[in-house]
Image (spheres, grey):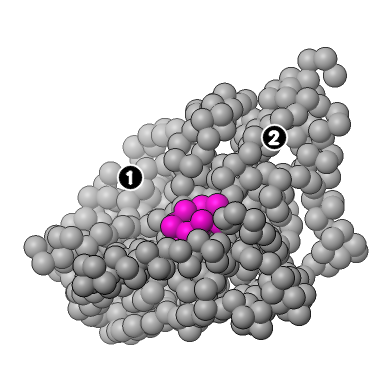
Amino acid sequence: MVNAGRLYGVGVGPGDPELVTVKAARLISRAEVVAYHSAGHGHSVARRIAEPYLRDGQIEEQLVYPVTVEATDHPGGYRGALEEFYAEAAARLAAHLDAGRDVVVLAEGDPFFYGSYMHLHQRLAHRYRSEVVPGVTSMNAAAAVLGRPLVEGDEVLTVLPGTLPTAQLSARLADTDAAAVVKLGRTFGSVRDAAEQAGMLTDTYYVERVGTENERVLPLASVEPETVPYFSLALRPSPLATATMATMATTAAQQTDTAPVPSGKQSRGEVVVVGLGPAGRRWLTPEAQAALSRATDLVGYGPYLDRIPANPRQRRHPSDNRVETQRATFALDLAREGRRVAVVSSGDPGVFAMASVVLEIAVEPRWKDVPVQVLPGLTAAQAVASRVGAPLGHDYCVLSLSDRLKPWEVIASRLAAAAAADLVLAIYNPASRSRGWQVAAARELLLEHRAPDTPVVVGRDVGGAEERITLTRLADLDPAGVDMRCLLLIGSSQTQLIERGDDSWVVFTPRRYVPRAPE
């Protein structure tokens, strides 16, 4: 096609945006369409690496794998599901190319080194002008981090996928000088066994997420299998170069009466305050999931920690929900010792949760050098609102009815002010076992400013096994049906409760404001 766009398979390297080649950066910035692969969680390593080179106005095509390693009910099995996915992805990109738009497909490392781009190239390169831009592989980057040459002189380097059977891996490792084994993750145990059988375990290294801030370098023999992600590799560098360097290091140590310093990075402690969303993993953002995955310690209210799958390499520190200050202090102390700590909150950590508590303590001088980051989460108010429509479609106010940290007089005055301003209200912590009278008191106060038929949404355990949504009028709000696991949405004068044609009800607040005529 004469006016068709051009296809580029662009390698973005192993993780460090500064390892992206000048040519790759130029093509990424210039492209009209940028495509990249991701798993179902939505996080794309390639896009994160390329992000500094993206610009406003570009079309992004996210190609989400239907499966990675999990089972599938596709009639063609795992292979059939992926074949169908690549065919559909190629068709999506072809539509842009046919329209004359240049398409850049991002690839971690090098596009033709165990990459997904090759499957698109096979389907499109014979139809459109195409170019492949090589990238730095994780194997090369790992050798650089180790400070060890891959091969020297006449040595042979063998690259192997960790998915091979253990016996085959062992035989190939024993028959080479240097080796790189990629695709670890779940295959790590087999790879470690193969290295041991080949007599290479003691001089093989493990490198994880090379080129990123979460990079980890260890001897292969000291790695716990449960901690190994997919983006890792095992590397046995040049035996000849390693022997030469060891001799030189020993000589230098004898001359200076010091021992050689081992390579590797010293980890720095941090505190990340993570919002888990209202309930369950599907409410968790990819950013929050990544923070939980790299943490060494998890700190939080016991029931919230229970929502995170157990990981043997992580320490869990549950506590009661009334010791937030002690919890924050404990987390900061752990981080000062070099631990990576995730402090978890339900919903969003900045909404009646742990973020403000941690920051209030972290500003004290003794923790001034401890990095603190806050990652947002889906709030309970947003979750409840989504179940009924869009009651938060206009200005709204968020309040807590709990008088544990502020007096009821302050709560009442704020309720009155928000009601007088005709704001929709999202009310957190409406009641507890020891505190049940505030719901009735709030209802009577609001009725001084709102019509009796004002829509009210009572959401309980949204996203959980006991989810219940109740629609009622303000005058009919029953305090007996409200507990600590509930959130209340009180409409404004503009909020509407409408029955649709399918016998369902929706609640929404229009974005335009039309003042009601005085009665």
The three-letter amino acid code for the residue at tag 2 is Val
The three-letter amino acid code for the residue at tag 1 is Asp
Q: Is residue 316 above or below residue 44?
A: below
Comparing 33 with 27, the one in front is 27
**In the image, what residue occupies the spot 78% across and 20% down?**
4
Q: Is residue 146 magenta?
A: yes
Image quadrant in which the C terminus is located = top left
Q: Is residue 28 magenta?
A: no
C-alpha separation, residue under disc 1 versus residue under disc 2:
59 Å
Point out residue 508 in the picture as x, y percentages from the top left corner.
51, 47
**Location of residue 503 by image quarter:** bottom right
Q: Is residue 143 above or below residue 280?
A: above
The magenta region covers 138-150
**In the image, what residue occupies the spot 63% across and 39% down?**
134
Q: Nearer the viewer, mark 1 or mark 2?
A: 2
**Badge 1: how crowded within 10 Å, few (<14), some, or many (20+)?**
some
Which residue is identified by label 2? 132
Comparing 263 with 335, the one in front is 263
Residue 137 seen in this snapshot: yes
Q: Which mark is residue 422?
A: 1
**Badge 2: how crowded within 10 Å, few (<14), some, or many (20+)?**
some
Q: Is residue 479 above or below residue 41?
A: below
Point out residue 258 in the picture as x, y percentages from the top left corner.
23, 71
Magenta span: helix, strand or loop, mainly? helix
**Location of residue 477 by image quarter:** bottom left
Comparing 251 with 287, the one in front is 251
